[in-house]
Amino acid sequence: IPVDRFDLVIFGATGDLANRKILPGLFRRFCAGQIPDGSRIIGAARSEMTPEEFRDQTAAAIAEFGGKHSGDEESLKGFLTLLDYVPIDARGEDGWDALKSKVRPEEINAFYFSVAPALFGDLAERLHKRGIAGKDARIVVEKPFGRDLASAKALNATLAAYFDETQIYRIDHYLGKETVQNLMAVRFANILFEPLWNSQFVDHVQITVAETVGVGGRGSYYDKSGAMRDMVQNHLMQLLCLIAMEPPYHFDPDAVRDEKLKVIRALQPVVPADMVRGQYQASKDAPGYVEDAENPDSKTESYIAMKCHIANWRWVNTPFYLRTGKRLRARTSEIAITFKEPPHLIFDEAEGEWRENVLVIRLQPNEGMNLKMMIKEPGPGGMRLVQVPLDMSFAEALGEEADITDAYERLIMDVIRGNQTLFMRGDEVEAAWAWTDPIIEGWEERGDKPQPYDSGSSGPDDALMLMHRDGRRWREIR
Ligand code: BG6
């Protein structure tokens, strides 16, 4: 479904995110017929560049990151006609009049802040004071949204000075992933799972976001951040919320976000014994974390595993185990919900080994779901139990229709539609930092050092112990 005509200004239009994700994503939406003629995409950045040069840069970015539409010359020509460019100094006075003359107040106006958070305030102030962004305009801000509670509050206050919360779209690109949204469909459009979705029936939940990449190239950012700030405070927290939240009364932005907020507020502090931090070591063909971060004394974690508790009626006895790390064995993100034993087993051991039901939601790659069930082994051999997967891959189940749209392009279209459901509200971000801060402060006070782990492994050995001592096991990363 096409969106209405819009003018989108991308600050930081020459940067990495714009070239890799935002512009190629918009191009794919254009090819899908979602962007109406007459819309404008206006790049804005410090570089002196003509609109023609910006189009050339964008064409090159699309050739590299445009995906299956990359070679579509006809569409590319059409898309490039939507582009314009204004050199602008976020902290100065240059370029703002030119920008104002290009943004049509009668259209939907969106301003994407793909710049360092230190510039958010400058941009917001100038857009407001110069009358470029009116009361219906939307601003889109990227993570990191602060580095602790105090800085997130300050950022929220800065934006709130010029924009209403209904105008602010805080991106967490995990919320734009196909399967992440599907989580809500699975939970709330089926009756099968919801009655079992609580401590009475769920033994535990595992959330894994494993990456094979290291931090080379962005070491200076990452070393001040670490896995906790870079991944847990936002992406893993959002996944946890979608699994744990109560059913919202409607699929409506505030109804959904109210329920997520309650989960974050119910999260208990994590004690040191329930956490393992790790740092990847050099392998024979790749440098280790400290080399990538160019900081031989770094105590920053590139891996974290933790056991979390949600103190509410639904989840009081169900631990949520989270882990994420760089340079692990495989790139895989999944959520696994392990159910409890049936209340009474009527089969003897001789009739096969009983195994738990597990619902695995694969976020990437090979998006899909897998429900492990016990059945009788087919054949004449009498009653023997075996576990089999009910497996569904979106690509196979839906064929061509399994349009696994990239998270960014979906979220940008939601901005144009004015739908905030998949964006974080200010109070949500603050609550997440309020939970994260004491954990990080604890490490700093104790001088906690992450444990080394081999590149290409599944993380530090102690992370295995975190589950073993509870009589449970991590799922394999593969
Ligand atoms: C980003 C983090 O937000 O998410 C990166 O800053 C991480 O460190 C990335 O690599 C992971 O995203 P995806 O979509 O590749 O899983």
Image (cartoon, grey):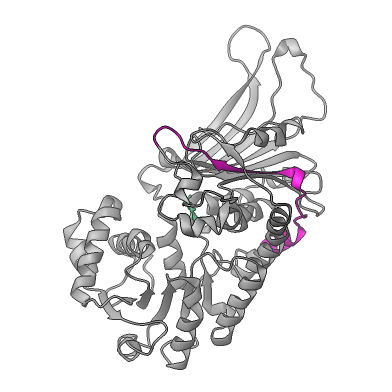
**Residue 31: quarter of image:** bottom left
In the figure, is residue 244 to the left or right of 330? right
Image coordinates of residue 193 in percent, x first then y, are 67, 44
Quadrant housing the N terminus: bottom left
Residue 248 in view (yes/no): no
440, 74: nearer the viewer = 440
Q: Compared with residue 47, is residue 66 higher up or lower down, i.e. above or below?
A: above
Q: Quadrant of residue 113?
A: bottom left
64 over 99 or under it: above or below: above
Is residue 441 visible to us here? yes
Residue 260 drawn at (x, y percent): 67, 61
Q: Quadrant of residue 413?
A: bottom left
Residue at the image position 54 percent from the left and 54 percent from the top: 181
Residue segment shown in magenta: 259-285
Q: Nearer the viewer, residue 45 or 398?
A: 45
Q: Is residue 191 above or below residue 256?
A: above
